[in-house]
Structure formats: structure tokens, C-alpha cells
Amino acid sequence: MSQNPDTLVQLQGVSKRFGSVVALDDLDIDIKAGEFVTFLGPSGCGKSTTLRILGGFEKPDTGRVILDGEDVTRLPPNKRKVNMVFQDYALFPHMSVAQNIDFGLELKGMSVSQIEARRQEVMSFLELDEFGSRYPDQLSGGQRQRVALARALAPDPALLLLDEPLGALDAKLRSQVQQELKAIQRRTNTTFFFVTHDQDEALTMSDRIVVMNGGKVEQDGTPEDLYLRPASRFVAEFIGETNLLNGHCLGMEGDEVVIDWLGTPVRARAGGLQPIKGSKVTCSLRLEKLGCVPSRSGSEMGIPAHIANKVFMGSRTAVTVSVDAAPEVLLRAYVDAEMAIGSVGDAVQIDWDSANLALLRQ
Amino acid sequence: MITDVQNQQKQSSVSSLASESGNAGQGPGDRIPFWGRVSGRRGYQALVDFLFASERRQFALLAGIPFIWVLTQHLGPVLQMLYVSFLDAYPVAVGAQTHLTLKHYLLFFEESVYRMPFLRTMTYSFALTFATLVIVYPVAYFLARHVKRQNQLAFLLLLLIPFWVGEIVRTFAIMILLGNNGAVNLLLKSLGFIDRPIPFMYTGFSVSFGVIYLTSLYMLLPLYSALEKIPASYSEAASDLGAGAWTRFRRVTLPLSYEGVASGCTLVFLMSTGFYAAPVLLGGPSTTVFAETIAGFFHVAGDRWPTGAAFACILFLASLTITALFMKFMGRLSSRGRR
Amino acid sequence: MTGKTRILMSLIYAAFVVYVFVPLSMMVVMGFKDSKFIGFPIKSWTLDWYGRVFQDTEVMSVFGYSVLIAIGSTLVSLLIGTWIAVLLAGRKFFGRALIFSLTILPAVVPGIISAIAFRIYARLLGIEPGMMAVIWAHAVHNVPFVVLVIVARLSTMPTNYIEAARDLGADPLVAFTRVTLPYLRPAMIGAGIFCLLLSFDDFVRSYFLGGYQPTLPVLIFSKLRSGMSPEINAISTIVIVLTAVLGVWAERSMRRMNGASR
């Protein structure tokens, strides 16, 4: 494997079983310094196991973990330049905020004045200045989360692990903390390894998202890649909402594949896939990328359909349409709430830009 | 790989500030805190690395002392007692040979002087355990079901304090209470029920009274914790189905508290068989219990230790057997109640 | 539940409280009686018996001796009990159930049998009857109580406290001393006081292993056998007061544990 100078962490062929359950199956991942990487997936997909292997709390059955050019596979957690923000923060209840932060600094062998300086720096950075003498049970959820972050950042780790750290916060606070966390990551320039099952969290914060399923990587890319160009059906369905279009491959045209969908030839972005002519294929089309206009508007370019259901959602309206060519096929679309789309049973035309129809791996 | 709009510029980061503050203010009086100094020591690190090198070594480190302690200090005395009970003489005289023998056990079956106290101990313990259960159950029930949760601890504490006072002091208290000039006789006399004091002391009554006084807490706590666990909604559900107070208790609460009954009775029974001071102080010649018989062999010069050990083994075995049978019975009772 | 049963139940509770307290209060009252004979009626009151107790060098030295034994045995019980508890509360291993049962064994062996077994085993170990023998017997007997309290406390400790400590650079030893031990502190205080009381009040083991030097309960026992005297009431009253103070302290320590964890 090539050693890129920017690479901070390398997982090479890492596998882990718990009894008969395969948690990780031959995982290969490189993480660059300064990246905000999110491991996303349902529970049991292997994302937490990856995190615990990086932290040193689990030893992989096979494979190697390279951190900063050094093989740390067998190194215990206390000897790694890696710190972690735990799911429920794991703040020591018998220590004040300041003592919690000092804990890691003391064990680095720093002197009293160094510890003092570093603690104040981290605390003012995270706006915790007035909480130094408070105890964890005297803090709110958001404050605890910041203390946990301060405690983990204080020893200046090469890699910061975050194990669903926003799970304990209420929805409103969570979106605010998401922004803060991203800003903190930029300003400290520390590599963040974030684990979550919440796709919104992943999409808003990450530079890069690795979608895991069944101990394997489903897709590895930027949030835009994952959302707009999902590589597999799992990713398309796990992230956001999508329409799945099933058809037969008619052939390739450059980067695009032509598909027979309900008797209509449609074009989809192949994204490097080369389906065999005549084979069954599935494509993903995001709800907001599906155009839907009333038939009476004069544009006869689209595919005819009828409105099957309509739900007003505030800023937009979710419309379910039944395609005329096959009334059992239902597609969903978001339309502007102001638009007079008509009511249930009215005829509509649907269409989309072929760049937004993404061919999925079978 | 992905190259998103990544923030590659090195801003004034926390990490870079760290190295600056690292050099600041390292004056001569600037010491390193204790834990930093300890874990920085090379010798200490080597020791820790050695001790925690492998899972197996960690476990050996953790389990070594407990295993040795439990086997030699907890099991050891019982096994040694069992062993001594089969010796013909102990302590062994210098140069003498010891032989294994059953004669101490046979002695128990031959002499009615020994059998009587044994049977008395068993019947007393059995009857007193039952009496304690009957007396304490309503108290535990009241505590668990009728007292507000936030007050329960205070109500319980009120009863706990006297029970922390030792066996001897409480036995003495019973002696004063039941004495010829004691509070009970005084009360009865002033109420005009009696002219002459009733001799409560040095009888089976005073022993029983004392033993119940000593054991009731050990009945109360298991009963209370079992009853406290039963959700009040069960009783409400039963009453909703038309069950009266007695039916509710008999069909719902009582079966669910069997576990507490079983452990409370076991504890109290085992304790009752082993009391020594209370029967000595409260009882008379007609109430000699087996514990006094056993103790007798240890007050003489020592050559009768094996007999004492054998008798202690008999008592222990009998208590354990009765306890085990009782537990089995309670287990069957509660499983039948469940069905 | 109907109001009638409720009243009946509270009467039963009240009766039980009376039953528990009356004998002890009678005894306390007798300690202030200005007469050598214990019993009613009481004609005049005095504090003489207390003065006598504090001037009685034998009682005072026995008291000190008992306190020493209590402290010594408690320290041993706490050390070993905590160690066993940490083992039992940790990950599963072969034979854990057996070790647990053996741990509890000394608490369920009936008093006289326990005393006899310790007496015999002390000879095997070469411990002469006396202070060391009593400390040893009390320590072994009290270990199960420590284990039960500490195991209960450990079971409430989130495992990620230790992981967090390890993550921040602590080796297993440092993580234990700086995180686990402080977390156990209230439980250890509670268990420790409980051990002090058990040891201080123990009669049967002290009696059989004590040799010629009595502990306080043994002294009271032998005084009682030679006849009752209000001096014993005074000693007992002092014991009750001490016990109550320590007991309430232990209870508070344990209760705080269930609330805030600090």
C-alpha cells in the first residue's frame, strides 16, 4: 500500500469476529491528517468496532493499524496518541471539570504550570472558563459534551474519536452542536473520526463519509457523492429518501446507460458501472430531483402520471404519483408548497435530469 | 480518494498553541504532579508492562489472592474441622500416632445426653424461625407497601439501629426485661393480674424470646426487599378482577414474596442453631442447647476437640440439610404458584 | 387497601418498634438507678455507675483492646473484600459461581460452628489464642459483607469510566487507583463501618479465640455470669450510643452513594 505523506491512519485488512458474528470483514481504510471522517451505518455494521480498534479497546483478529507511520495494532489505549469522546461522555463524577481535563495532561508528565496553561487554553477555546470548579452532575448535557471534548482534546491527540457524542442531546441543541463541532475541527486541525447512525449528522459535518454495512464498506466518499451519486441500493436507501427505478439495460452511451423503464428508454449516470445488456438494473432518483408539473401546463415532454397522494409539509409538498404506464409503480416527489399541483387523481407529467438518475450496484 | 473543500490551511490551532505553552513558565519551582512523576518513571513503566503483559497474567494478578484467600480462609477452617472430627486425638501429642476413627460420631448416637440438646436445638430453631416469620411478615409488609417510598428508609433505619447493637448487650436487655423485678412483671403486677412475679427467666420462654429478639432483623430485610419489588399495580389489577383483600394477599402478594420468605427463614434458621451466649445467659439446665454441648468440649484441656468438631459437623450438616430441603420446598411452592 | 387494614398494619409496626426498643430502653434506664439491684421500682437516680466505668481501668483497657481489634480486622476485610469484589464483578471466568459461594460461606456458618472451626484452624496456622487470632477470625468472617456491598457498587459503575481513563493515558493500575477506588469510596466507608460494628459486637468468635484477654462483649458476658450490676448497664449504654452513631453514619454514607455519585 502506498504511503501518502498526508496519511495519518491506515487500517490494513482488519477483521474482527465476536463469537460467530463478523463485526469487521477485511477492512482497508486510509485517513488523511486533518480530515473529518464519519463512519455511518446501522447498529451492528462495524462502525463502533472500527472506532474501538482505533482507540485500542479491541484487538483485531487479523490486519494492522498504522498510526502516523507506526504499527499500533497491539498497543494499549494509554500508549496511543488517540483520544476519545465517549457516547455518554464518561466524565469522572468525582472530579471537577478542571480535574477531568487535567487527568490526561498529568499522565503525559507535564508540569503544573504547563497543565495550568493548557487547561485554560482548552477551556477558553470551548467556552468553559467559568465551569472549572463545577462537577459533572452540575452541568447540562451540552456543557458535559463540551467538557468531554475538552478533556479529549487537551492532550493534543493525533486522532480524535467521537462515538455518537450527540446522541444524548435533544434535537434542537444537536444541530447547533453539529455546527460547533465542525468549527472546532477546522480550528484545531485535528483529525476527527466520527461514528454515528444519524445520516443528517454525517452529511452536515463530514469531509468524508464511509458508509458501513455488515462489516464492509458500502461507499466511501464526500457527502455530496453519497447523497447525489449513491453507489448501492443500501446507501441510496440509508441516506435521505429516494425513488428506486427498476428496468432493463439497453446499452451504454458514453458515461450513461440507457434503460428500458416501463417501456420508456431513459438515461442514467453509470458512475463507472458496466451492466450487461439485457440485465436487470436499479437506479436511484432523489425525491427533490423528480420534477412534477400539472399536465395542463402544456409541457408534454415528461412521462404521464396521476397524483395518488399529497401531503403538505410546510416548506414543500410531498406528492406520490402513480405512473400511467404501470399504475402499481409509485414515485414520490417534493414540489414547492406554493405550486398548484392539483389534487389527488389529477394528471401530471414527471421528468428528471439524467445526471440525477444514478445507476446502483446490484 | 475524496478531496472535498477541505480546510488545509494551518490556522492558529489548539495544537500549535500547546507546544508554545509547553515551553512557558518552566521555572525551578515548577514541579510535575504526582501521577505524572510516577507514570513517567522508567522502573514503574517496566513493572506495569510486565504485570499487564497478557490477559492471562492480568487475570492471575487479579484472581491469585482472592482464590488463595477463599480456599484457605473460607473453606479451610470447615475442612480442617471435618478432618479433626475423624481423628482419635487432637492436638496430636509429640511422637504419637493418629488414626482415623468414627467413634466421635458414634458417641453422639449412643449417648442421649448429647442427643437431647441436639433435638432441642433443632425443634427450637424450627419453631422460632416460624414464629419470627409470622411476627415480622406484617411489619415488612407494612414497610414495603404502606409507607411512602421516601419515608421507607427512615422507618427502616429506626429498626436497624437497635439491631446493630451486639448479641450480648441485647441479651442482657432481655434479662432485665424478663427478670423477676423486670418491666413485664412490674407491668403485670401494677395492672393487678399477678401478685407474685412470674419466673420468666431461665426457661424455654426466655430463650425463645431472646432468640427472636436477636434474629428478627435477618427476617425483616429479605422480606422487605422481596415485598418492595412487587409492583403495587399487581394488587390493583387483582382487585380490579374482583379479588378481596385476603384473596389478593394469598394469591398475588404472598406467592411473589416466597423468595424473601425462603432466604429470610434460611438465614434465621442457620443463625438460631448457632447461638451460644443467649441460651447460656437466658436459659437454665432444662434448656441446654447443642451449641453449649459443643462448647463444653473446648473448655477442657483439649483432648476432646475431635468430639467437639464431630458434633459441630453433625450440627452443620443437619442445618444445611434442613435448609436445603426447605429451599426445595419453597422453590416448588413458588413454581406451582406461578403455574 | 382498606383503611381498616392500614390502621391494623401501622399498629403492628408500632408494636414491633416498641418490642425492639423497650428492652434496650429498660437497660439504659437501669444504668441511672441509684441502687445495686437491677429492677423496678426505681427510687432515686445517679450517674455514679458511669463514673465507675470510666475509672475502671480494666473496662477502659478492654474497650481500647476491642477498638484495636475492630480496626485491625476491618482493614484486612476491606482489602481482601474489595479485591474479591473486583474479581467477581469483572468479566466471567470458569468457577466464578463457586468462588462466589465460597466467599459468602463464612457469613452463613452458624455462630458456634464458625467459632469452633476458627479455633481449630488457628492451631493449624499456628496462631495462639489472643489478639491476632481474634483479628484474623473477625477479618475472615466479615469479608462476605464487604464483598456484597462492593459488588453492588461496582455493578453500577459504567465500564467506560475505566476506558476513558485508559484512553487518557492511564495504565490499568493508575486507572484503578484514580477512577475505580474513588468511585468505591462511599461503599468502602459503609462496608468498613459495618465491619467495625460486627467486630466490636462479636461475641462467639472473640470468646473462643481470645485467650485470657477479653473483648468488651466477652467481658460483659463474664460479668453477667457472675451477676448483674448497673455498671454493666452503663457500659452497654455507652456501646449502644457508639453503635447508633456509627450505624447512622454508615447508613448515610451508603444512602449518599445511591444518590449523587460523588
Image: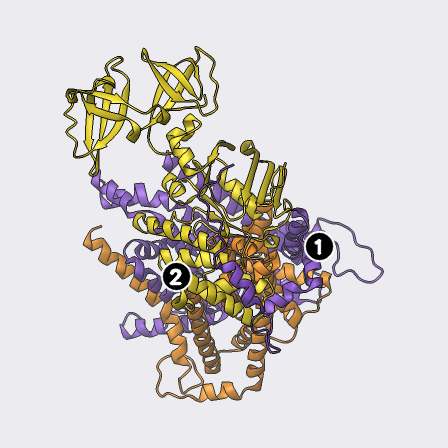
Chain colours: A yellow, B purple, C orange
Q: State the image quarter where residue C75 is shown.
A: bottom right
Give how far across and how far down residue A26 sits, in percent. Answer: 58, 32
Can you say which quadrant of the picture contains the C terminus of chain C? bottom left
Q: Name the residue under label 2.
A: A137
**Which residue extends farthest front?**
A254
Type of amino acid under label 1: Phe
Q: Is residue A274 placed above or below C181 in the rendered structure?
A: above
Q: Name the residue under label 1.
A: B50
Question: How far apart are the two marked residues, 2 and 1, measured between alpha carbons?
Answer: 37 Å
- Circles 2 and 1 in contact, beta carbons < 8 Å: no
Q: Please tell me how crowded label 2 is: few (under 14), some (14-19), or many (20+) other residues with Cα within 10 Å.
A: some
Give how far across and how far down residue C197 sits, in percent. Answer: 50, 69
In screen coordinates, is B320 left or right of A248? right
Q: State the image quarter where residue A10 is shown.
A: top right
Q: Nearer the viewer, residue A104 or B102?
A: A104
Q: State the image quarter where residue B176 is shown.
A: bottom left
Give how far across and how far down residue B317 sits, in percent. Answer: 59, 49
Q: Nearer the viewer, residue C249 or B156?
A: C249
Q: In what element is the residue under mark 2? A: helix
Give how far across and how far down residue B59 sits, in percent. Answer: 64, 50
- What residue appears at the point 45 percent right and 60 percent down from the top-left corner? B215
In screen coordinates, is B99 left or right of A126? right
**Residue B124 in view of the camera:** no
- What residue appears at the point 66 percent right and 63 percent down from the top-left corner? C119
Q: Is residue B95 placed above or below B334 in the rendered structure?
A: below
Q: Which chain carries label 1?
A: B
Q: Is residue B306 placed above or below B193 in the rendered structure?
A: above
